[in-house]
Image: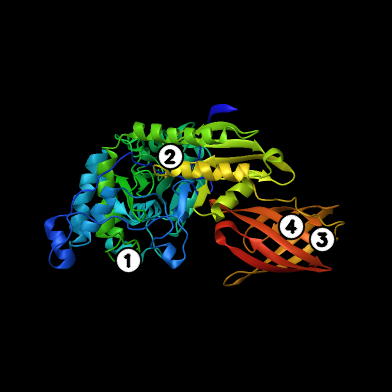
């Protein structure tokens, strides 16, 4: 199949992705004074470039393996690759001392003007922008209420439509605000009381339409004089700003995604008083946000990123990424059973094409899951945007390539590595399934040993042969269990809904009569061990 279909890699997708790769960039020279400060006499007129190689660099020297990033701007793999102009600005800024209030006032005004907003404050990322916006909307710059926060507050609630609940609304929750969910315009009207500090919205296609669209919510909230914050972290910051035009009071962006600025920086755009109030609540001021310290390097770095955003040829970048994907397709096309699909984002987040490769693992003898693991363990280490296929039940396999953060030449590295893995696969065997099935139906008391601390849960299992189902009762949250028992080998999995997020549990263990033990994988939260006894 060769399609150009719609697929939306939003921030909801596996701890999310975005970013843009510049077609070309040239670093600006250091000032002569900064160069003299660098060594006390004379220095090169420009910042030195990296002297490392993919095999030998400052990370490999400490035993950390760098990644060829065909995955995206995930924070856990350090976001985006900052532009040369950003590196230059951060380097030069490091030589001077300035007053941070004066710097933020000037840079905030400049960025606001460049992006067509009334005001701007630089933050330590979009999550910090969410938290600081919440506090600014809760107590403004009232010194007494700011010092009493979060134990006492003038406004205690933040409304979030159900379609906008997500892991990143932790930025609201961490301030101690009460989350009030709404699912209709009528419910929003009813719950917009004097207790509400702010309405939080996650920008997405779901927020573009219907009664609870961004525009409709802004209109309803404006009538009650309640600010609206739009989380647009992974989006392109178009001018004029579409969310401010729709009536939003504030918009948050990540600096380390499509703008390719500092990873530890973000922007809070919008109402001039509220953006200044957010800075008032942040470091260096001794208020709630004292921990959100943005340095002069990050402030000047993101200023440079915004400047470059207006100069970059974004359509040329799109063509470049598509060209790289076509190179990868051409390399893989001769392989049996391969077909290709091009995925396009639906909105401003992660605005890059992606290539999805399909094949039959019964023909090529490797699944997409096995291939992505092989490339992640390889040299060079290559991280793809996911793979599918499970042996032996699901041999229809895929892998996905995201070119957003690749550099010129890396498309050939990725293409060659995938080609070798598909054409000369390692030996993979179907998992050995033990005969019979231990009896495990009933209630189990489960003790979970985390890295630090213990948890107590209860499983209530129903067994039909080797198939298991049931409930997982945690200390605070509950989930539905599914799994298998083959011989004494037990596997259970669940997805536990929590506030705005979920925890994925993947239990593996061995049964011995009325006891069982093993390990549980928790995704980004690591691995824990568990022991259980039957009630």
Q: Which numbered disc flags the more N-terminal residue, 4 or 3?
A: 3
Residue 26 coordinates in the image, percent (x, y): 25, 45
Q: Mark 2 vs mark 1: give the one in front.
A: 2
- Near mark 1 (Cα within 10 A), the count class, few <14, some 14-19 or many ≥20, is some
Q: Which residue is mark 4?
A: 491
- Near mark 4 (Cα within 10 A), the count class, few <14, some 14-19 or many ≥20, is some
Whether the residues at callouts 2 and 1 have beta carbons within 8 Å, the answer is no
Q: Which numbered disc flags the more N-terminal residue, 2 or 4?
A: 2
Q: Which residue is mark 1?
A: 147
Residue 73 coordinates in the image, percent (x, y): 44, 48
Q: Which residue is mark 3?
A: 442
What distance separates the C-alpha of mark 3 from that of mark 2? 46 Å
Q: Which numbered disc flags the more N-terminal residue, 2 or 1?
A: 1
Name the residue nearer the viewer: 268 or 450.
450
Q: Which residue is mark 2?
A: 349
Q: Which numbered disc flags the more N-terminal residue, 3 or 2?
A: 2
What distance separates the C-alpha of mark 2 from that of mark 1? 37 Å
């Amino acid at each position: 199949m060769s399609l150009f279909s719609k697929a939306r890699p939003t921030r909801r997708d596996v701890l999310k992705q975005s970013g843009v790769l510049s077609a070309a960039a040239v670093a600006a020279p250091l000032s002569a004074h900064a160069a003299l400060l660098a060594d006390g006499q004379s220095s090169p007129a420009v910042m030195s470039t990296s002297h490392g190689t993919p095999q030998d660099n400052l990370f490999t020297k400490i035993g950390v393996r760098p990644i060829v990033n065909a995955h995206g701007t995930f924070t856990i793999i350090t976001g985006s690759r900052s532009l040369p102009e950003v590196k230059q600005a951060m380097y030069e800024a490091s030589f001077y001392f300035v007053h941070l209030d004066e710097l933020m006032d000037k840079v905030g005004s400049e960025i606001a003007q460049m992006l067509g907003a009334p005001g701007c404050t630089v933050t330590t990322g979009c999550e910090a922008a969410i938290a600081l916006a919440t506090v600014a909307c809760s107590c403004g710059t009232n010194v007494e209420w700011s010092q009493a926060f979060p134990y006492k507050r003038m406004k205690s609630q933040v409304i979030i439509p159900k379609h906008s609940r997500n892991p990143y609304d932790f930025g609201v929750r961490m301030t101690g605000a009460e989350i009030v969910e709404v699912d209709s315009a009528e419910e929003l009207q009813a719950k917009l009381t004097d207790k509400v500090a702010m309405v939080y919205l996650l920008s997405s296609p779901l927020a573009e339409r219907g009664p609870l669209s961004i525009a409709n919510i802004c209109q309803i909230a404006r009538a009650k004089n309640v600010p609206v914050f739009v989380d647009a972290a992974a989006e392109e910051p178009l001018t004029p700003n579409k969310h401010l035009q729709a009536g939003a009071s504030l918009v948050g962006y990540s600096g380390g995604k499509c703008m390719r600025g500092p990873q530890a920086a973000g922007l809070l755009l919008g109402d001039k008083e509220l953006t200044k109030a957010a800075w008032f609540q942040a470091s260096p001021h001794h208020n709630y946000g004292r921990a959100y310290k943005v340095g002069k390097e990050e402030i000047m770095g993101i200023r440079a990123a915004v400047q470059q955003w207006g100069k970059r040829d974004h359509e040329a970048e799109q063509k470049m990424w598509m060209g790289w994907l076509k190179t990868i397709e051409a390399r893989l096309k001769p392989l049996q059973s391969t077909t290709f699909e091009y995925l396009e984002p639906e909105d401003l987040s992660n605005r890059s094409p992606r290539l999805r490769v399909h094949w039959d693992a019964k023909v090529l003898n490797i699944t997409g899951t096995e291939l992505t693991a092989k490339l992640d363990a390889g040299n060079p280490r290559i991280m793809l945007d996911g793979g599918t296929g499970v042996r032996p039940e699901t041999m229809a396999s895929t892998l996905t390539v995201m070119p957003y953060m690749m550099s010129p030449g890396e498309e050939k590295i990725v293409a060659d590595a995938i080609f070798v893995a598909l054409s000369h696969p390692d030996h993979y065997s179907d998992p050995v399934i033990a005969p019979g099935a231990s009896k495990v139906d009933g209630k189990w008391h489960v003790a979970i040993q985390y890295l630090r601390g213990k948890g107590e849960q209860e499983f209530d299992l129903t067994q039909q042969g080797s198939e298991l189902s049931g409930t997982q009762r945690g200390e605070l949250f509950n989930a539905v269990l599914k799994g298998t028992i083959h011989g004494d080998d037990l596997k259970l999995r669940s997805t536990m809904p929590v506030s705005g997020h979920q925890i994925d549990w993947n239990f593996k263990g061995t049964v011995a009569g009325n006891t069982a033990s093993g390990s549980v994988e928790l995704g980004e939260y690591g691995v824990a061990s568990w022991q259980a006894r039957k009630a």
